[in-house]
Image (spheres, rainbow, N blue to C red):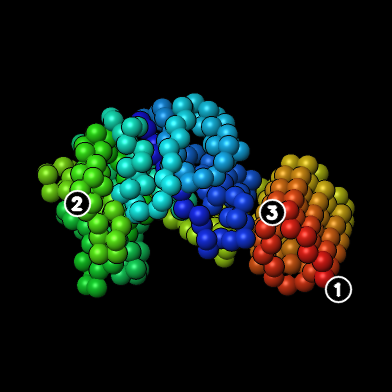
């Protein structure tokens, strides 16, 4: 089983953090977003992931090395492809066409999700991960007939289905998907908004008689904005426990809270809903509904709904702030 993950987007809604770190590498309670996504596949698929192919922008060798190390931890080989110009979802997947043979999963690195048990791909040419939603008019949806998907509708104005497509797709024959993507890109078949759309390739495969089935998602969490990143971290924190007997006496914890390795705490109140990454230093401060990235320092501050970048320094601040990596901010 091969896993293709397009992640070339700049994640502009998560700035300032994505000025220096691609969105999928941002931490969510101790693990990178992309790591949690791959972990979900490793746990829920019946087949082993043998290769992970990443489609990147110009993120540089440090990011690529992190992805390679992570991939090896899952016992898979790492392939790197590049999308120099964003031209749509079909083009992003097309960039990884050389890894598109045999069983393939395409997963866009925008969201976290959970499924119950194992995902079966038996008796299906393709499987689409779906989540029931209350407002289907905001999503692309799959129309069902029993346990088969019969069609797809983008942001339906009529209530044809409440099964939203979350951006994860399985194909039994990756070469068939590659054929459709090559046809779309090389024949310049674009949508009205001027992009190459993955849905066009999927529609073509469905029209050819391929059997499409659903995989039901029980949890679907967005990480596309600063608030969504905080909210998703809050959801993940519900599953994490900390050992309070190792904390200093002048530290107060209101769970859920995540505290990474080698964190220095002195006279602080944390939580609820706070994540502190490895090597951070917190002194004389309180944090609520906030994220502090690795090696950051927060002192003499009271923050809520905030995100502090890696290696950043915060002093004498109150309220809500969002500062990027290596930044320095100090109140009066």
Q: Earlier in the sequence, mark 3 or mark 2?
A: 2
Q: Is the residue under label 2 in contact with that under label 3 (CB below 8 Å)?
A: no
Q: Secondary structure at mark 1?
A: loop
Give the alpha-carbon distance from disc 1 to disc 3, as whole Å.
22 Å
Q: Secondary structure at mark 3?
A: loop
Q: Residue at x 25, y 60 (%)?
A: 191
16 or 242: nearer the eye?
16
Residue picked out by circle 1: 332
Q: Earlier in the sequence, mark 2 or mark 1?
A: 2
Q: Is the residue under label 3 in contact with that under label 1 (CB below 8 Å)?
A: no
Residue 203 tag number: 2
User: Alpha-carbon neighbours of circle 3 within 10 Å: few (<14), some, or many (≥20)?
Assistant: many
Q: Residue at x 55, y 49 (%)?
A: 22
Give the alpha-carbon distance from disc 3 to disc 2, as whole Å.
42 Å
Q: Position of residue 224 (x, y in %)?
A: 50, 60
- Count of picture labels: 3
73 or 174: nearer the eye?
174
Q: Residue at x 55, y 29 (%)?
A: 73
User: Alpha-carbon neighbours of circle 1 within 10 Å: few (<14), some, or many (≥20)?
Assistant: few
Quarter of the rendering containing residue 160: bottom left
Residue 325 tag number: 3
Give the alpha-carbon distance from disc 2 to disc 1, as whole Å.
59 Å
User: Alpha-carbon neighbours of circle 2 within 10 Å: few (<14), some, or many (≥20)?
Assistant: some
Tell me the quarter of the image containing the C terminus: bottom right
Q: In the image, is 90 to the left or to the right of 301? A: left
Q: Position of residue 123 (x, y in %)?
A: 20, 36
Q: Position of residue 188 (x, y in %)?
A: 23, 51
Q: In the image, is 40 to the left or to the right of 227? A: left
């Amino acid at each position: 089983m091969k896993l293709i993950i397009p992640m070339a987007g700049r994640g502009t809604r998560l700035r300032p953090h994505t000025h220096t770190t691609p969105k999928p590498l941002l931490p969510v309670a101790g693990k990178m977003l992309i790591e949690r996504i791959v972990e979900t596949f490793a746990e829920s698929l019946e087949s082993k992931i043998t290769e992970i192919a990443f489609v990147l922008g110009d993120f540089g060798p440090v990011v690529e090395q992190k992805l390679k190390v992570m991939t090896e931890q899952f016992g898979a080989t790492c392939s790197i492809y590049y999308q120099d110009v964003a031209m749509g979802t079909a083009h992003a997947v097309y960039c990884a066409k050389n890894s598109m043979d045999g069983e393939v999963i395409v997963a866009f690195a925008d969201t976290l999700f959970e499924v119950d048990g194992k995902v079966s791909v038996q008796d299906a040419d393709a499987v689409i991960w779906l989540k029931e939603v209350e407002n289907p008019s905001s999503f692309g949806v799959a129309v069902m007939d029993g346990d088969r998907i019969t069609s797809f509708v983008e942001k339906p104005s009529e209530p044809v289905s409440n099964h939203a497509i979350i951006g994860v797709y399985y194909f039994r024959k990756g070469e068939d998907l590659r054929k459709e993507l090559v046809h779309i890109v090389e024949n310049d078949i674009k949508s009205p908004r001027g992009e190459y759309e993955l849905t066009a390739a999927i529609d073509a495969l469905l029209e050819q008689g391929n059997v499409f089935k659903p995989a039901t998602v029980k949890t679907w969490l967005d990480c596309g904005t600063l608030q969504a990143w905080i909210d998703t971290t809050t959801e993940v924190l519900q599953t994490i426990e900390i050992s309070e007997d190792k904390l200093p006496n002048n530290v107060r914890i209101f769970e859920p809270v995540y505290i990474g390795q080698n964190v220095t705490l002195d006279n602080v109140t944390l939580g609820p809903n706070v994540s502190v990454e490895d090597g951070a230093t917190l002194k004389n401060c309180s944090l609520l509904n906030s994220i502090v990235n690795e090696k950051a320092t927060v002192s003499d501050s009271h923050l809520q709904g905030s995100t502090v970048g890696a290696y950043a320094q915060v002093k004498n601040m109150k309220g809500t702030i969002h500062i990027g990596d290596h930044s320095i901010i100090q109140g009066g």
